[in-house]
Image (spheres, rainbow, N blue to C red):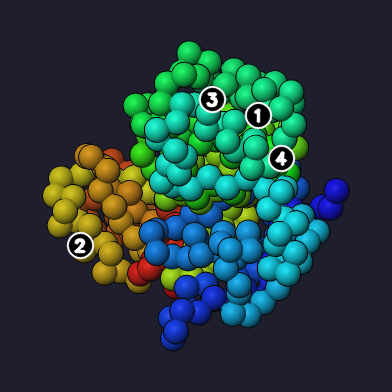
Amino acid sequence: MTEYAIKAEGLVRKFGNFKAVDGLNLTVPTGSIYGFLGPNGCGKSTTIRMLTGLLSPTQGSVEVLGLSIPRQAEALRLRIGYMTQKFSLYEDLTARENLQFIGQIYGMPDRQLSQRIDEQLTTYGLTRLATQRAGGMSGGQKQRLGLAAATMHKPDLLFLDEPTSAVDPENRREFWEQLFDLSDAGTTILVTTHYMDEAERCHALAIMEAGIVRADGAPETLMNDMGVSVVEVEAVGLRQLKEQLVSLPQVRSAAQLGIRLRVLVDTAIEDPIAWLQQQQPALRHGRLTLARPSLEDVFVTCTGEGRQ
């Protein structure tokens, strides 16, 4: 087993004159959960298609599970699972029939297949739904069935493309518990998401914007190294206050959260609370506290207008 399940260098994908992915470098350690965080259209899905061999890169090299992609893509397909954002199983087949169909695609012998179907139905809480047609299932149930199908053949590497976009928070949490179980068993997982709380659950992640990786590393490291202090402000006139603060070059961004204003101040300012009160005397009558950075703060500071 290699140290890295995925290694990509200088990955570029053009569609005409448009660069969907621009010079991506990526290393995903074996057995880890690695996240791609970014808005829709930033290049996450295009990257996954190149890593699986479904798309050929315009430039760059890709090695997945020790195989050169796309040249050895056929051999790779037997060792990976792929779950898309949109439910892609047959809605007129039952849960058991869908899993049986997937198992037969991978050439599983009948006795092994029957045993594996029962295992998957139990693992993903689908035993009661074994004879129910997939089309009549809820979003969370379809999600669990999709993951059961994607892992039927015990893949070494699992690609999940926005897998929780259509389910409620409780089902999302259960889904992630199942991902941690897979990771503990040795499966490497690459997941794309635009949910900040999900990205924080990953062992490591890359933040993408316009086809470019703006930051990558462990979530805690990214939060600690982002170069800003976070100050939460409770005061009157937050809307006007925000407009005034974001005009200052030392303020990376400001966002209102209910009755608080979350202000990101460059770490060059040693005492951000005193500095803010100096810039806006009205803040001397407000309540200012230092807060823990979040992954959303990281995203704001390294993408769009927040990037310096």
The three-letter amino acid code for the residue at tag 3 is Arg
The Cα–Cα distance between marks 4 and 2, rounded to whole angstroms, is 62 Å
| Relative side of 109 to 56, left or right | right
The Cα–Cα distance between marks 4 and 3, rounded to whole angstroms, is 16 Å
Find out whether the residues at labels 2 and 3 contact each other: C-beta distance under 8 Å: no
The Cα–Cα distance between marks 1 and 3, rounded to whole angstroms, is 22 Å
Farthest-out residue, right:
1
Q: Which mark is residue 107?
A: 4
User: Badge 2 is on which residue?
Assistant: 243
Viewer-closest of 189 and 116: 116
Whether residue 218 is situated above or below residue 208 in the rendered picture: above
User: Badge 1 is on which residue?
Assistant: 181
The three-letter amino acid code for the residue at tag 2 is Glu
User: Badge 3 is on which residue?
Assistant: 96
Nearer mark to the viewer, of 1 and 2:
1
Nearer mark to the viewer, of 2 and 3:
3
Residue displayed at 22% across by 57% down: 242
Quadrant including the C terminus: bottom left
Q: Earlier in the sequence, mark 2 or mark 3?
A: 3
Residue 112 on image: x %, y %: 74, 26
Q: Earlier in the sequence, mark 4 or mark 1?
A: 4
Q: How many marks?
A: 4
Farthest-out residue, bottom:
17
The Cα–Cα distance between marks 4 and 1, rounded to whole angstroms, is 25 Å
Q: Earlier in the sequence, mark 4 or mark 3?
A: 3
Whether residue 124 is situated above or below residue 108 in the rendered picture: above
Secondary structure of the residue carrying numbered label 1: helix
Nearer mark to the viewer, of 4 and 1:
4
Find out whether the residues at labels 4 and 1 contact each other: C-beta distance under 8 Å: no
The three-letter amino acid code for the residue at tag 1 is Asp
Residue 252 on image: x %, y %: 38, 63
Viewer-closest of 154 and 202: 154
